[in-house]
Structures are given as structure tokens and as C-alpha cells.
Amino acid sequence: MKTVFVTVGTTSFDELIERITTPEAVQALKGRGCQQLVLQVGRGSILPESDSCYELGINAFRFKDSIAEDIKCADLVISHAGAGSCLETLGAGKPLLVVVNDKLMDNHQLELANRLYKDSHLLYCTPSTLVETLKTMDFSVLSPFLPGQPKHFADFLDRALGIQ
Amino acid sequence: MSDWRKRVAVVAMALFVIFAGLSFIVICFIVRLCIVIRSGSKCKPGEKGPICVLVVAGSGGHTTEILRLMESLSLSYSPRHYVIADTDKMSEDKIRTFERSKKNTGSEGQSVHAVYLTICLPQFTLQRIPRSREVRQSWSSSVVSTLNALLYAVPLVFRLSPDMVLCNGPGTCVPLCAAGLLLGLVGLKKVLIVYVESICRVESLSLSGKILYRLSDYFFVQWSSLKDKYPKSIYLGRIV
């Protein structure tokens, strides 16, 4: 896991950014072979400097038009529970660790992350269990996430609307 | 005394007539609505030619999902009118990029008719209406802004007169589907309402979904847990 990409989407999730840059978390990441940490921090108040850690290369930014390239280059994606981030990462076939913001209650976006966790497509933790999870996580237990089939929709609609 | 009684009788009679009249209108409306909704399964616009589609794109995730669906549809679905909220620049870019790529993947394996359609008919248009509901907007002000959006939706839908409305849950889709229903109610054209609940919805429907569950002709969900709760829905697995 040379490159780890952390993304919080359009929200802010300072607790995640704070936790992932603590010495313990950095040690755990290094233990996994991580050399480069890329952080997308969104509207958060913390934007780590690139020289803030001498053990890992850190590259932090707020937003990009598309994070597809960052996902493609990453060996592990650590994400908030947002549906868009989860689907984009799984769609790219990358291992995904979702960190749930337990301070946000009644967030319907959690529904999807929760289900994907139950169907063992991703790993799941909270900011307080992040370091522990980084040490013990095992992605070999996950099953691949197959892409959705819009063709089934098109075939159904063609039949229903009488298109030959 | 009897004069007073007479007056009461007249007023009561008048109230009764008004009440009966209103009830009659309401019942007629409901019956008509049921007939229009029921007629969906028999409505096969594809037998007559290309299908004019009104696509309701929302913000961000909604647009990405609906374009995944549009990608799978053949050129028999032409022209395609995309409706976006007037504050949404990102969706416009996504739609233009998508339509450009659709054009490029032309001709191969398509009938002469389809090729003719690509060349001769306007492929797609972009339409804007005011946003009917911002995320986390309160209920009461949502009602007002949805009514406002309806004022724009009705003329738009009557002008475009689509064969079907395709949407997946942004607030904007409710007034547009209502306008589509209205077209059917007044007997001008049956507009099929195709609703695809967002993949984000696993355990519960979105507000738009709850409203359109009974009013739509084809209602798709993407998780079996929702199919169990809403038996009228169509479940084909994940389709985006």
C-alpha cells in the first residue's frame, strides 16, 4: 500500500484528517508500506502542510473537479460514508475503508455504506477505532463489487414501451 | 320563527349542494387520475416511433446516476430534453460531455432509421427551472418553492409534450411529473412516468420516491430490501 488516499467529499470531517495524521496512525500506515498520503479535506478547517510529517509524503488539497485520478493511483482509499465516494472507489476496484462520522446522526447516506459493509464490499470504522483498524484490517475477506447493470433497465424499458 | 327556519333550510341546502358538487369534482378527479395512471401499462409509444424523453437531472450524484441509465438507452429514445435546476452548472457540463460521447459512438450496428435519427433530429436540449427544494430545506417552504417550480414545469411539459419523464429523485422531479400527469388528466397525451430510486436508498424511499410511488408507471428500486417494503416496485438488481 504505497499510496493511501483519504477523501471526505464535499463535507468537512476534521476528526478523520486529525486522526489520520497523528503519529500512531502514521506509524500504522508505514507498517502497511505506505509512503505517500494524499488528503482531500473538503470544507474542513485542517489543511495539513506537505512538510508536516517527515516520515510520509503528505499531499493535501480541498477540492478537485474529479478525484478519479487520485483513486486510480491509490492502493487504499479511506473515505467518509458518502455514497458518491464509496461507489466511485468500489467501481474503480480499490480496497476501501469507510470511516463513519459518528457525530452525524440520521444521515441517510449511512444506509448505503452500511449495506455495502454487510455485503462485505468494504471495511468500516469510526475515528476512535481508526488506528486500531489500520493495524488489524484484512482486505482479503472482502468480496468484489460488481458494477450495476443499466442494460437490464434498458431491456426492461424497451419491452415495456414496445420498442422493437 | 318560520322565516328564520326557512333561511336555515336554504343555507343548509346551498351548503349541501356546494359540498355535493365539490365531492363530485373530487371523485371525478380521483377516478380520472386512476384511469390515467392505470393506462400506463397499455401505453406503448415505442411502437409508433422514437420516444421523446424528459430527463430530470438533479445535482451531483443524481446526475451521475441518471446519465448511467441514459448511457444504456438506445437512440430510439430521441430527442432527450434534460431539465436541470437553474443553479446547477456542474450537471450541465456533465450532460454536455455525455451527449458528445453518445454522438461519437454512432452508426455501428444501427439501423438506417437510427442513423437517420442521429443526423436529422435535434438530439438533446437543456431546460432550466427554479430549484424546487434545496437539501435540508424545511417542509413548509418546500411546498411554496415546489408550487413555484410547478408554474414553470407545466408550460415546459405542455410545450415539449414528452412520451415519458425519467427521474431518480431530485426535488425538481415532483412538479415535472405532476405536470406530466396533468397532460394525461386533460386528455392531451399520456406521459409515462419512469422513476428510478437512487442507489443510495437501501432501507427507505426518498421524499420524491414516496410521493411518486403511486403516481408513477414504472417505479424501480435497486435493493431487495426496498422491494420487500414496496411490492409495486420493480427490482432488477443494481442498475447504475
Image: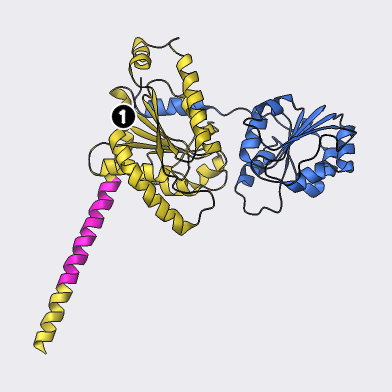
Chain colours: A blue, B yellow
Q: x%, y% of residue A47?
A: 76, 41
The magenta stretch spans residue B152: no
Magenta segment main secondary structure: helix
The magenta stretch spans residue B25: yes
Quadrant including the N terminus of chain B: bottom left
Q: x%, y% of residue B234?
A: 46, 37
Badge 1 is on which residue? B44
Please identify the quarter of the rendering in which residue B142 is found: bottom left
Depth check, front residue: A85 or B87: B87
Residue at x 40% of width, y 55% of height: B144
Residue at x 70% of width, y 54% of height: A103
* Image: magenta residue range: B14-34
Q: The disc labelled 1 sits on which kind of residue?
A: Lys
Q: x%, y% of residue B184?
A: 27, 41
Q: Is residue B180 visible?
A: yes
Depth check, front residue: B186 or B155: B155
Chain letter, disc 1 residue: B
Q: Give the left or right position of residue B48, taking residue A158 as reference.
A: left
Report how many numbered discs are placed on residues in the image: 1
Residue at x 47% of width, y 29% of height: A153
Q: Is residue B222 visible?
A: no
Which secondary structure lies at badge 1?
loop
Quadrant including the C terminus of chain B: top right
